[in-house]
């Protein structure tokens, strides 16, 4: 090989550096990336807006609507406006707002919800007053559908503890029950009507007033009105009656009044709610019930025993709801106590004559097994003998005429609820479960089974007791340790960048 070749080895080709992109090219590339990022962000958010999952993690499912309400909202055919007229200092404002947000989300854009604070939003509150003619003097929820409106006060949304204190604590929130009932009323545009029978006496004037006021209260919550009627002053039950209330009558109906009652019962969609007074004189009313399959025995349901302090006799009946009847199915896990006196009911469920008339009887409340029906209830220490009634003891029952074996005719059936106790709605002894039972029975009479069983949500107060040492530990962790850790990580990152 020539020396020149050895002295001059081949050289590698020189790599020319790539030309720098022009400034407008860099700008275009960055702009394109920004546009793509924005498009991706907008697309993801749009998908998230229309397709998402929500979970109610509260212990008692406080923010979950019942299947009945969801079903009604799904079939809603008219637009509804709902106004939350609440001061922000109200203890239930947050729950009302969260609940109505659920109505809005499930209302298929038919329900619009607005919030108005009458103290801060004075102009909007005055405009709403002018539009509706309502004073809006207290907190509440206004529901409007066309020309129909319903204002639900804050007190109708809650159940407070009993007592004489002026600052009663809220023990239950029953907002869904009240709002769904009001929603039905404004959409239907018609308020149901129950006639309350007066002129037949009662255990006392106070008991008569309690029962009447309790039904008025239930009417506001369940969308029906209560009108008093004296059967001796009319010739027939009014044609606009959605139901008849005979509550704790002390004296019997006349023969003419029994004929009126029977004529009404034979019509389609009749509804009768009866609370019997075992100490009253109601032979004709009892005979009417017996003909329809529920026979009041005239005894007293009680439990009696001999104790170290002497004989003990208790007429207050502890009972449970039967599981076979759909309209009280939501109450089957609850117990009920009927104070005062009750008589046992004989239910003729297997009577062939009644079946031919399409009459069905169902027990509603069953007394605890230790109770029996005593004939000699005035004795100091009654004992069970042959003439007494042994368990099972029924103290409430339902009667339905015209729907036996034919579900398609059930909407036109006549219905009756019979309770063998006159104290169910007494103000001093009425429990929340008693009110719920009465509400369920009245809704059933109005053929509103789909809206029976919206339970109230219990309110619980929790208190955490912390010792002084625990308070100090929380202070050091939250105020010193955690901020110090964050500060330390920040210093480490800063130091590593400085060294690089």
Image (tube, grey):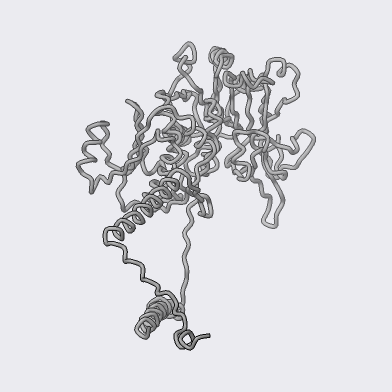
Answer left or right for 375 relative to 416: right
Q: Is residue 415 visible?
A: yes
Looking at the image, which residue is at 73% across and 37% down?
392
Is 48 drawn above or below residue 438 in the view shown?
A: below
Answer left or right for 123 relative to 91: left
Is 373 drawn above or below residue 1 in the view shown?
A: above
Answer left or right for 31 relative to 261: left
Residue 42, how many percent across, how many down?
38, 49
Residue 216, by quadrant, is top left
Q: Is 261 or 126 nearer to us in this picture?
A: 126
Residue 73, how many percent across, how many down?
47, 34
Is 275 drawn above or below residue 98 in the view shown?
A: above
Q: Is residue 205 visible?
A: no
Toward the front, the furthest residue is: 2
Total numbered labels placed on residues in the image: 0
| Quadrant showing the C terminus | bottom left
Residue 134, how many percent across, how many down?
27, 34
Residue 186, by quadrant, is top left
């Amino acid at each position: 090989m020539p020396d020149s070749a050895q002295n001059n080895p081949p050289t590698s080709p020189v790599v020319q550096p790539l030309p720098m992109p022009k400034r407008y090219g860099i700008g275009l590339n960055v702009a394109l990336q920004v546009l793509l990022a924005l498009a991706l962000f907008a697309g993801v958010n749009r998908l998230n807006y229309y397709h998402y999952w929500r979970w109610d993690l509260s212990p008692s499912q406080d923010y979950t609507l019942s299947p009945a309400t969801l079903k009604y909202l799904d079939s809603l055919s008219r637009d509804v406006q709902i106004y939350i007229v609440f001061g922000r200092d109200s203890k239930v404002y947050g729950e009302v707002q969260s609940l109505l947000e659920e109505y809005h989300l499930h209302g298929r854009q038919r329900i619009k919800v607005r919030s108005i604070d009458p103290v801060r939003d004075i102009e909007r509150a005055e405009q709403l007053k002018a539009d509706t003619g309502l004073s809006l003097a207290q907190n509440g929820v206004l529901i409007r559908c066309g020309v129909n409106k319903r204002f639900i006060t804050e007190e109708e949304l809650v159940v407070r503890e009993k007592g004489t204190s002026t600052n009663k604590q809220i023990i239950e929130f029953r907002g869904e029950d009240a709002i769904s009932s009001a929603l039905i009323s404004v959409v239907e545009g018609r308020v149901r009507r129950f006639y309350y029978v007066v002129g037949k006496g009662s255990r006392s004037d106070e008991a008569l007033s309690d029962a009447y006021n309790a039904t008025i209260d239930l009417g506001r919550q369940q969308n029906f009105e209560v009108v008093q009627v004296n059967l001796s002053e009319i010739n027939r039950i009014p044609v606009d009656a959605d139901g008849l209330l005979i509550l704790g009558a002390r004296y019997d109906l006349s023969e003419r009044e029994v004929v009126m009652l029977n004529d009404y019962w034979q019509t389609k969609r009749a509804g009768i709610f009866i609370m019997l007074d075992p100490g009253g004189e109601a032979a004709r009313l009892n005979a009417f019930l017996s003909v329809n399959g529920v026979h009041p025995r005239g005894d007293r349901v009680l439990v009696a025993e001999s104790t170290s302090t002497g004989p003990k006799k208790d007429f207050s009946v502890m009972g449970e709801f039967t599981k076979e009847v759909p309209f009280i199915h939501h109450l089957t896990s609850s117990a009920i106590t009927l104070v005062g006196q009750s008589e046992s009911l004989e239910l003729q469920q297997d009577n062939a004559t009644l079946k031919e008339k399409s009459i069905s009887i169902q027990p509603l409340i069953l007394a605890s097994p230790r109770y029996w029906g005593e004939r000699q209830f005035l004795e100091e220490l009654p004992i069970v003998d042959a003439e007494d009634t042994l368990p099972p003891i029924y103290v409430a029952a339902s009667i339905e005429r015209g729907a036996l074996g034919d579900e398609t005719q059930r909407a036109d059936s006549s219905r009756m609820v019979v309770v063998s106790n006159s104290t169910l709605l007494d103000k001093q002894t009425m429990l929340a479960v008693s009110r719920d039972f009465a509400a369920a029975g009245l809704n059933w009479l109005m053929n509103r089974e789909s809206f029976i069983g919206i339970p109230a949500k219990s309110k619980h107060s929790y208190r955490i007791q912390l010792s002084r040492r625990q308070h100090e530990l929380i202070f050091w962790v939250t105020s010193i340790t955690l901020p110090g850790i964050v500060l330390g990580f920040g210093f480490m990152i800063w130091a590593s960048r400085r060294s690089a």
